[in-house]
């Protein structure tokens, strides 16, 4: 009886995976079907202001405005080749469209035009000149609302080819329409690229199919489970699936590499799969945890788009790890014959020559990396950023961008700020309106007090006018200024307007608009960055330390990755490119979390080889045997990044793709050159510590076995 009991006590999770593989397959099939059904039900949000903390000024102002007036979308429309009176006709037709709240044009900002008095060109140049007419439109509903989208379509139908449209409403519409088609194209390209790379780097024609199947299941489960979040940001919706595919492919590669090694030893199929799970699980779990915590740090951002993206990416990593460790062994056992029948010789040459070259140049590469680290760190802090949503959908090459340039060329810029003040005094409201009009940067000011002649009772005025500008408790003033939505001048102008409003309404007043949102996003996200970056680094370091039981190894592994991050983030400054800060911040965590896998795998291999080799031989062998799987992983992630960069018209997503692509190349190069140099230099304390930890581990294991034996004997 004792042997049977001993066998029962030695039952492990690996035995469960092998014995219950059919049940595991059924479980994943059911979960995938449910997730596939849930995925289309997940909403997509295009409004970055929803992620601002409720404590910010603009969010508080927006809450008041939504309650009193609604949250209007805005657009700027220019019509070419029209006379003044044709333009007036277009204005009236646009104003009558369902969903349009108001149209600011010559006759609304200057009542003299309504009386058909003599028109002077200098008085109308802000809205009509040289056969071009421009109008500022406020919609009844938000930028992303269906009613607003339909209104924009009707504007295009009315004006035809003559029309140019810019502003937050058309940006939201463009994002909505382009996102799905662009991501479908990007995903198709990514899948083709990954399959080609896997065909070249694996030793079976069927393995790429198996890899893609496992990852597809993990992605569907992850994206479908987002239904518990209700909705995700358009950034998350765009990049989460392709990043999960690219980052988590490593785990399948690790498992199959271990399986092939076991088969080469002559083990039978079941034993080879069992050993492969045991041997690869350490690397997969260590890499998965490091990446998981690298992403989960984003969830700590006060600007909660980080929570949205961080949770989705971290959840994707956890899903991928579990799918590889539980489902992939079952599928390998099911299709082992097919894998072996389609086997072929390696198409990638051995990396021995590269390994020897890397070892010979170890001191040069290490010195260069350390030399460039400091200026790279300084350079990344000098980048110029954008923060708001205005730069998302108007990337060069898009119709929105071309229209914006055409309008700005004729009329300059126009930026709407909405002033919300207590409805306590028409006199005070008129004084504030005049003070705002007197500002040199102001284009026009529309308020109830400066539109309606004194003495006319509100009860006889059109309801649409009063509802636009007045409620029982609040008044709304529409202020158009000649700035971009986001610039130093725009921020300065916004501050001046807020100061002016405060003079007349010290309490209860708010200023809302794309500029104020960008200011609050900037203040929130820049304070987030240092905290998130520090937590990301510390959490990854902690995972490495626990995996290797060494503080020294945690430091050494992070050195090449962090230098690669510094260099990557320095490039935009060197070439003078602006970055969207959300993308910059996200990629800092992604590059750390995704490419630390490379350092973990190389270090694991080095320590394994070091137990039976001298340090030089162990270093060269580790480089040679690690470079090939890392090259596969890095090539996939790099090409995924550059696919996003080249296919997306959305600025933030293109930025993320570019930074990921370049960052992966840098991380790969530094891991296979600088990290081996560090391991070689610090070999003595590393091997001494590892030997000590193995001795302690062996003693604990012996004590545990002895304790178990005593317990069995008592039974």
Image: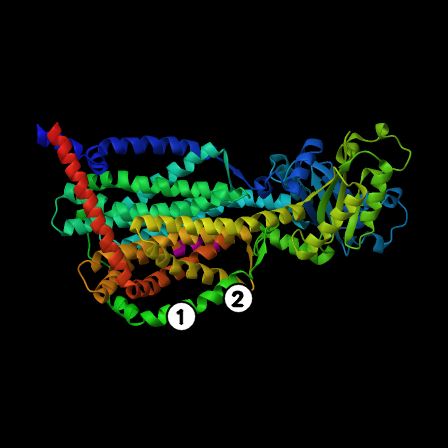
Residue 95 picture location, percent across and down: 74, 38
**Could you tell me if the residues under marks 2 and 1 are in contact, i.e. CB atoms within 8 Å?**
no
Residue 512 picture location, percent across and down: 69, 42
The disc, 2 or 1, on the residue closer to the chain's N-terminal end is 1
Q: Is residue 22 left or right of residue 140?
A: left
- The secondary structure that dominates the magenta segment is helix
Q: What element does badge 2 sit on?
A: helix
Quadrant holding the N terminus: top left
Number of numbered markers: 2
Residue 534 picture location, percent across and down: 47, 51
Part of the protein shown in magenta: 638-645
Q: Is residue 417 left or right of residue 632?
A: right
Q: What element does badge 1 sit on?
A: helix
Q: Is residue 351 left or right of residue 528?
A: left
Residue 639 painted magenta: yes
Q: Is residue 201 left or right of residue 185?
A: left
The part of the image, by quadrant, that contains residue 96 is top right
Badge 1 density bin: few <14, some 14–19, many ≥20, Cα 10 Å: few
In the image, residue 630 sits, relative to residue 340, either above or below, namely below
In the image, residue 714 sits, relative to residue 62, either above or below, namely above
Res 368 label: 1
Residue 271 picture location, percent across and down: 15, 42
Badge 2 density bin: few <14, some 14–19, many ≥20, Cα 10 Å: few
> Which of the two residues, 252 or 407, is positioned nearer the viewer here?
252
Res 47 label: none
> Which of the two residues, 703 or 567, is positioned nearer the viewer here?
703
What's the CA distance linking mark 2 and mark 1? Answer: 18 Å
Mark 2, residue position: 574
Q: Residue at x 42, y 34 (%)?
A: 225
């Amino acid at each position: 009886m004792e042997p049977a009991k001993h066998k029962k006590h030695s039952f492990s999770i690996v035995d469960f995976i092998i014995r219950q593989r059919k049940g595991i397959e059924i479980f994943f099939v059911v979960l995938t079907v449910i997730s596939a059904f849930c995925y289309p039900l997940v909403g997509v949000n295009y409004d970055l202001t929803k992620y601002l903390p409720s404590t910010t000024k603009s969010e508080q102002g927006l809450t008041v405005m939504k309650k009193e007036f609604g949250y209007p979308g805005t657009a700027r429309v220019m019509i070419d080749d029209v006379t003044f009176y044709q333009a007036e006709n277009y204005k009236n037709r646009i104003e009558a469209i369902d969903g349009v709240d108001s149209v600011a044009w010559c006759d609304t900002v200057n009542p003299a035009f309504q009386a058909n008095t003599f028109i002077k060109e200098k008085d109308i140049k802000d809205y009509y000149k040289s056969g071009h007419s421009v109008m500022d439109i406020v919609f009844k509903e938000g930028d992303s609302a269906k009613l607003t989208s339909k209104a924009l379509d009707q504007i295009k139908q009315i004006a035809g080819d003559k029309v140019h449209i810019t502003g937050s409403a058309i940006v939201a519409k463009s994002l909505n329409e382009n996102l799905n088609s662009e991501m479908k194209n990007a995903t198709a390209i990514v899948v083709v690229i990954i399959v080609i790379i896997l065909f070249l780097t694996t030793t079976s024609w069927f393995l790429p199919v198996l890899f893609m199947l496992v990852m597809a299941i993990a992605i569907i489960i992850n994206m479908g489970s987002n239904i518990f979040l209700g909705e995700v940001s358009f950034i998350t919706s765009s990049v989460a699936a392709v990043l999960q595919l690219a980052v988590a492919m490593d785990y399948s590669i690790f498992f199959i590499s271990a399986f092939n090694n076991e088969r080469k030893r002559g083990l039978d199929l079941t034993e080879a799969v069992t050993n492969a799970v045991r041997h690869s699980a350490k690397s997969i779990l260590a890499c998965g945890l490091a990446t998981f915590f690298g992403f989960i740090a984003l969830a700590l951002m006060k600007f909660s788009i980080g929570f949205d993206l961080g949770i989705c990416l971290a959840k994707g990593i956890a899903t991928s790890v579990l799918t590889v460790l539980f489902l992939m062994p079952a599928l390998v056992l099911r299709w082992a014959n097919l894998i072996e029948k389609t086997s072929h010789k390696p198409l990638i040459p051995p990396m021995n020559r590269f390994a020897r070259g890397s070892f010979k140049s170890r001191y040069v590469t290490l010195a260069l990396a350390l030399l460039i680290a400091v200026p790279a760190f300084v350079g990344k802090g000098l980048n110029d950023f954008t923060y708001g949503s205005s730069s998302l959908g108007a990337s060069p090459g898009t119709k929105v961008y071309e229209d914006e340039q055409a309008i700005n060329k004729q009329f300059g810029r126009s930026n709407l700020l909405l002033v919300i003040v207590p409805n306590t005094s028409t006199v005070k409201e008129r004084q504030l309106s005049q003070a705002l009009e007197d500002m040199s940067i102001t284009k026009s000011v529309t308020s109830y007090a400066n539109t309606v002649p004194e003495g006319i009772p509100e009860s006889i005025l059109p309801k649409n006018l009063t509802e636009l500008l007045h409620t029982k408790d609040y008044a709304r003033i529409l202020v158009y200024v000649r700035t971009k939505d986001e610039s130093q001048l725009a921020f300065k102008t916004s501050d001046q307007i807020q100061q002016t409003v405060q003079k007349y309404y010290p309490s209860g007043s708010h200023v809302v608009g794309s500029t104020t949102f960008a200011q609050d996003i900037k203040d929130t996200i820049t304070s987030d960055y240092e905290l998130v970056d520090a937590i990301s680094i510390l959490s990854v370091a902690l995972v490495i330390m626990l995996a290797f039981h060494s503080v020294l190894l945690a430091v050494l592994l992070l050195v090449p990755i962090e230098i690669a991050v510094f260099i990557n983030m320095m490039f935009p400054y060197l070439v003078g490119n602006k970055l969207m800060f959300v993308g910059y911040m996200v990629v800092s965590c992604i590059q750390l979390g995704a490419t630390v896998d490379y350092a973990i795998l190389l270090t694991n291999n080095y320590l394994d080889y070091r137990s039976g080799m001298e340090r030089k031989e162990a270093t060269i062998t580790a480089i040679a045997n690690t470079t090939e799987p890392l090259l596969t992983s890095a090539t996939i992630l790099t090409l995924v990044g550059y696919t996003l960069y080249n296919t997306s018209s959305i600025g933030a997503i293109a930025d993320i793709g570019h930074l990921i692509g370049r960052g992966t190349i840098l991380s790969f190069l530094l891991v296979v050159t600088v990290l081996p140099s560090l391991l070689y230099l610090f070999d003595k304390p590393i091997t001494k510590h590892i030997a000590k930890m193995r001795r302690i581990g062996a003693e604990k294991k012996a004590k545990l076995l002895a304790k178990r034996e005593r317990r069995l004997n008592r039974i």
